[in-house]
Amino acid sequence: MSATLAKGINSFKEVIDTPIASFFSSCVHCGLCAEACLFYTETGDAKYTPIRKLEPLRRVWQQEYTLLGKLGKTLGLSKPVTDAELEAWEPLVYDSCTLCGRCAMVCPVGNDLTYMIRKMREGMAASGHAPEDLVGATTRAVTIGSPMGIKWPAVLAQIKHVQNETGIEVPVEKEGADYLVLMSSMEIINFPEYLSALSRIFKQTGVSWTLAQDAFEATNSGIQIGASDLAREIVSRIVVAAERLKVKCVISPECGHAFTALRWEGPNLIGRPFRFEVKHILEVLDELHTAGRLKTKGKDKRPLTYHDPCQIARRGGVVEQPRRLLNEVASDFREMPDAGVMNWCCGGGGGVSANSRAEPLRLQVFKHKKEQIEATGTQTLITACANCRIVMEEGLEHHHMKVEVIGLTELLAQYLVEDNTP
Amino acid sequence: MNHLDLLTFARGDALNWALILFAAGVVLRLFEIFGLGRKADLAKPRTNSPGSGWRTVFTRSLPPQGLLNREPVTYVGGYVFHLGLFATILFFAPHIEFFDDLFGISWPNLPSALVDASAVAAIVALCVLLAHRITNPVKRMLSGFGDYLAWALTLLPLLTGYLSFHHLLFEYTLMLSLHLFSVELLLVLLPFTKLFHTFSVFISRWYNGDIFGRKGTAS
């Protein structure tokens, strides 16, 4: 095990940079990050305090990159990070952190704890302390092309289904299209309505788009497990396809971490800026709507609310767009308490939903989302992330709540003004 | 060595050495932090938002939505302590004279009674925050020797200053010497304890604002 522990420690040393050193230097142990964390507020267990999840990384920083720490290490006064400790920390770093970033918004000294957890996971994975399920998902993503093991024929089957249903051709491998559309495994398996809605919206708005055979999957478990080399390989497929097809823009689907992986981490993973833009589907729909190209008719009369996916809103900057779109098609849109950048996570982000060991805890902390939904008095929940959607559907069922969850793209398509001329 | 000699030493050599060690410590710690560097972010920022790092340096002083209600002791205690401490350090007439001697700059002072009240408020806040640290499960779990040391290092100058001002406990010259020594101890150890946040808070908040600013969600 020592070889892998050494790799983990080395990885910790590699990821520590000026921001991380400033974060650890500034922490005054006030504990306010706990108050922002779903896993602490819903369990009351102090061990879920976000900054504590970083303790092994902090000690490596202190022992390697501060004079006093080095002195302590030389004199044998400091406690080295051990394999057993990393093993004990694995559930804290993976099962009880969704990388939601709420703690980073409240820390009085400005520590971006999510930035640190994301980087710490590199060392956890390198030392062999990543959850088995995430290792499996990442392996499938690299070898098969999708974390859920989906191959192109499955996508093709869905394309045929959508074409039959809508009578609209789904473009594949169309060079020179404006947009390359990606999907998440979850959408391919569970929510075919996304592709169907997109086909109809893009036909009405006259958008030129395409799917790519070798780059249909937007998700990237490499960034969840903390394996930048694998994350780079997964993101490169999209870059290669986008550049081969000469698209102007790649559309990240209704998926939270896929957006982070492609939009914010992507260029850094491949080591150069992209030659195309990356937009979340809600940004594209909002632009089409603002330009007057996306026309809707009628409004949903049901009281409904919107769940901000963390990676789309707080860590993605897409906050106003869903609200503008929702107000266009809903007459009784009600905000949840703390909506927008301070929204609470569904509990399943950052790889937690793919980690079966974390399931009981995930269902327990869903209590907060339950209370948020109940506060709105609605029974229709709109969101823009297929992972949030499945996590919330499971949570709602677990808590015996009769609330329907719908993707925003799909809701928009229901009120689309369609021109039926060919 | 009589009390006057002690005070002369506290004001002279001891102070000079403390200031030198303080400056060296701060420079070393800043070097440790900035020496690591960071990779340039190659992702195109959502909006060009120059200054979002600096904005967060200021805005992060305000409690975020909902947190004040969840943790009133930490917030109220934190504000009272910091404001009381700054008022005492910066606006007490003898302190301003001291800074004038040292750096040749001065500014208007606050009435002594107000400074006195500020110091008492800061001391009370420190005591409340210590009690909270010991009783709150999250804070207690996070706390170690360094946290209690930092607390004591901060309390001593306030307490000795208060006692000197009111001519309490010891003879004035001795008490004033002790006040100076406590400040000197604080100066020497500040860079190597969590009290270094006095400086690093500007760096960490700046990075937070910069990282979120690029995504378009900085506070």
Image (cartoon, rainbow, N blue to C red):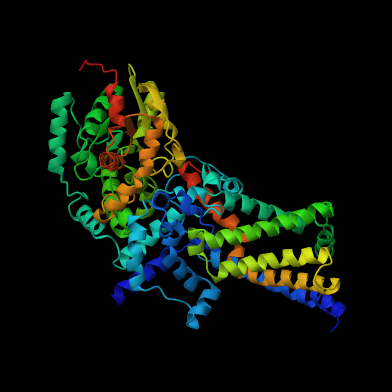
Question: Measured from the top left, where is residue B98 in percent x and y?
Answer: 82, 64
Which x, y percent locates residue A107?
Answer: 52, 52
Left or right relative to A182: residue B36: right
Identify the residue at image location x=64%, y=51%: B79
The correct choice, above or below, for B90 with respect to A286 in the image is: below
Residue drawn where x is 32% and y is 48% of the image: A364
For the C terminus of chain A, the image quarter is top left
Q: Nearer the viewer, residue A307 or A413?
A: A307
Report the side of A167 relative to A290 (left or right): left
Q: How many marks?
A: 0
**Snapshot quadrant of residue A224:** bottom left
The percent position of residue A1, horizontal first and vertical second, equals 28, 75
Q: Position of residue B25 (x, y in %)?
A: 64, 71
Q: Taking the image as drawn, is residue A184 in sight?
A: yes
- Residue B135 vertical placement versus A62 (above, below): above
Q: Nearer the viewer, residue B1 or B197?
A: B1
Q: Is residue A114 left or right of residue A94?
A: right
Is residue A216 visible from the viewing direction of this image?
no
Give residue A168's quadrant in the image.
top left
* Foreground residue among B122 and A125: B122
